[in-house]
Amino acid sequence: MEITEVRIFLKDGNDKKLKAYATVTFDNAFVVRNIKIIEGQKGLFVAMPSRKLKDSCPKCNFKNVVRSKFCNNCGASLPVTDRKPIQAMDMSEKESEHRDIAHPITLECREYLQKKVLDAYAADVKQGGTPAPAPSPAPSPVPSPVPSPVPENRESKPVREDITAPFREEKRRLEGDLEF
């Protein structure tokens, strides 16, 4: 397996730990997006894309974020779990609220991926890369005039009736009747 492309999207904002996002292509056949480049206590590292874990509400079965106190759907109190606060946990005891969507299985693969991503990040920063702008919407093409479904030489009612006319008349009638 070979990493054939790494794209870096520098992050601009108040988050000082999150430096950039990366998109990695493997063998010109498989893409992993939203790989995060984070500044940790020991330097830069790569975090794989993840999702928040969810627990079901016992009353309505709505999926709520782990450690929620109340259901976001019905408002019922959720059962308290035995999880310790994150600050009080050792790294070995820590239960994550996130689960990786895709991740390397072997240490060699993780090191290879991290080296390639961090090298591309360093090259992008050295090159004077600027944070990626938010994607702008594609300009919409100017619509061509739609031909009328009624032939021009034929006299008839317009194809589209004004269906809002009765509502406008009712509104005017009501506004005239109301006194403040």
Image (tube, rainbow, N blue to C red):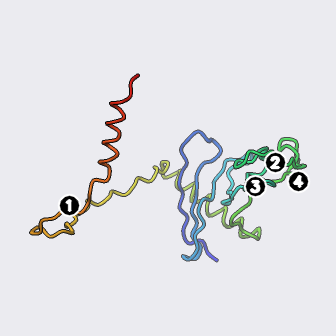
Q: Looking at the picture, which amino acid does disc 3 mark?
A: Cys
| Between 114 and 70, the one nearer to me in the picture | 70
Q: Looking at the picture, which amino acid does disc 4 mark?
A: Ser
Label at residue 158: 1
- Badge 2 crowding class, 10 Å Cα cut-off, few under 14, some 14 to 19, many 20 or more, is some
Q: Nearer the viewer, mark 2 or mark 1?
A: 1
Rendered location of residue 116, percent (x, y): 62, 64
Q: Hey, which quadrant is residue 143 in on the image?
A: bottom left
Q: CA distance from mark 2 to mark 3?
A: 11 Å
Q: CA distance from mark 2 to mark 4?
A: 26 Å
Rendered location of residue 140, percent (x, y): 32, 58
Q: Is residue 154 left or right of residue 51?
A: left
Furthest-top residue in this view: 180
Secondary element at tag 3: loop
CB contact under 8 Å: marks 2 and 3: no
Q: Nearer the viewer, mark 3 or mark 4?
A: 3
Quadrant (top left, top right, bottom left, bottom right) of the N terminus: bottom right
Label at residue 14: none
Furthest-left residue in this view: 153
Label at residue 60: 3
Q: Looking at the picture, which amino acid does disc 1 mark?
A: Pro
Mark 2 and mark 1 lie on one chain; the one further toward the N terminus is 2
CB contact under 8 Å: marks 2 and 1: no
Secondary element at tag 4: loop
Q: CA distance from mark 1 to mark 4?
A: 74 Å
Residue that carries the numbered disc 4 in the rendered image: 92
Q: CA distance from mark 2 to mark 1?
A: 59 Å
Q: Is residue 123 left or right of residue 159?
A: right
Q: Nearer the viewer, mark 2 or mark 3?
A: 3
Residue that carries the numbered disc 2 in the rendered image: 78
Residue at 66% over, 60% down: 49
